[in-house]
Image (cartoon, grey):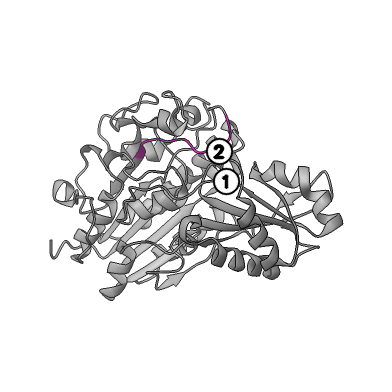
Amino acid sequence: MKNTGINRVFLIVLDSFGIGAAPDAAEFGDAATCSTLRSVTESGLFPARNLRDLGLYNIDGVDCGRMHDEPVGAYARLRELSRGKDTTIGHWEMAGIVRNEPLPTYPDGFPADVAAQLEAAFGRKILCNKPYSGTQVIHDYGREHEETGALIVYTSADSVLQIAAHEDCVPVEQLYAYCRKAREIMCGAHAVGRIIARPFVGAYPNYERTPRRHDFSLEPTGETILDALKHAGKDVIGVGKISDIFAGRGLTRSLGVNESNTDGMRKTTTLVDEDFTGLAYINLVDGDMIYGHRRDVEGYAHAMQEFDDWLGTFLPRMRESDVLMITADHGCDPGAAGTDHTREYVPLLVCGAYIAPRSLGTYPTFAMIGASIADMFDVPLTTKGESFLPSILI
């Protein structure tokens, strides 16, 4: 589709903001009742005026909140087609890559031969080596780490290898170097989606993780909308974890990992006033990282309401040629049992001067997003997604 009049797309991912259990939730160990949106809405702390105006509660299958009589955005429910419920798989799919095979996970910890390779590469012993909560693991192993210098290596239900270290014992740049060595080891059958550096500070029992987390991701296994836009000479700007998630590929510029959602929203406000042509891809992670895994409903609700309030200041700054897309990469229901992500549908809200407000129903893959952005800029992208742009372009 040519000459759409669209010059910039702001794609904002509210990390883990799912809207209800996917049909295959049970296959991922999740209840049919899981819903991040419902837990947050029923807290009573999430008025969501701006998201409601865009059609959040009008989306197919949403069974909470108040529908809007005349939403100002187009809205849809997206189902994940890939076999996973993590950040990497979710972002890759919305960018165009659908994976039939899940990335490897380690419910029993990493095999002995892998652990031995890691210790040899680090020149240090490792502690833990099992799935663990990120805050609990530093509480339980932090003192031993400080006393022995051994690195805390752990995983989760996701395809990750995480390395935690106290900043006084292991300088952050050294921790990053260990993660790069781990990335070289975790390949082939052990090609996890992400190696994550988890620096922390403080004294037992009051350890705290710092904002200097860094992800060393597997490079995307196919072409993405980021690659397609960059090849076409468009700007592709990442905010937050985007550069980490895509191993830096396809970006023309990165504004770095956010210190918080507030920092990410500030960076996005700066971008809306800049001149560029292409995609600004933003990840806001607090809902997932700080509140979802800790099952903190109140904190999650406050974080989403902070975004909703900011949205009220962002929308008036958009140019006529701008499109805003708001979505999520998976769920992490703070009202569910356990501490892991939840396999959920995700919302898609789209608005702009050239976008007609209407329901788009339910789509079978997040890849509809990448296909639609490719359509907006008339760039080629091979993906299982289908563009919804013809249905909403004025």
Name the residue that disc number 2 marks.
292
Which quadrant of the view contains residue 184?
bottom right
Q: Nearer the viewer, residue 390 or 368?
A: 368
Image position of 83 (left or right of 351): right
Q: Nearer the viewer, residue 356 or 375?
A: 375
Residue 106 position (above or below residue 44) = below
Image position of 360 (left or right of 184): left
Instruction: Work out whether residue 32 can be spotted.
Output: yes
Question: Magenta region's main secondary structure?
Answer: loop
Looking at the picture, how far across and down is residue 75, in whole percent?
27, 40
Looking at the image, which residue is at 65% across and 41% down?
A: 133
Q: Which of the numbered marks, if any, corresponds to residue 232?
A: none
Name the residue that disc number 1 marks.
289
Q: Amino acid at mark 2?
A: Gly
Residue 214 position (above or below residue 22) = below
Instruction: Give the residues drawn in magenta, as a range.
Output: 338-346
Q: Amino acid at mark 1?
A: Met
Q: CA distance from mark 1 to mark 2?
A: 6 Å
Callout 1 touching callout 2 (CB < 8 Å)? yes
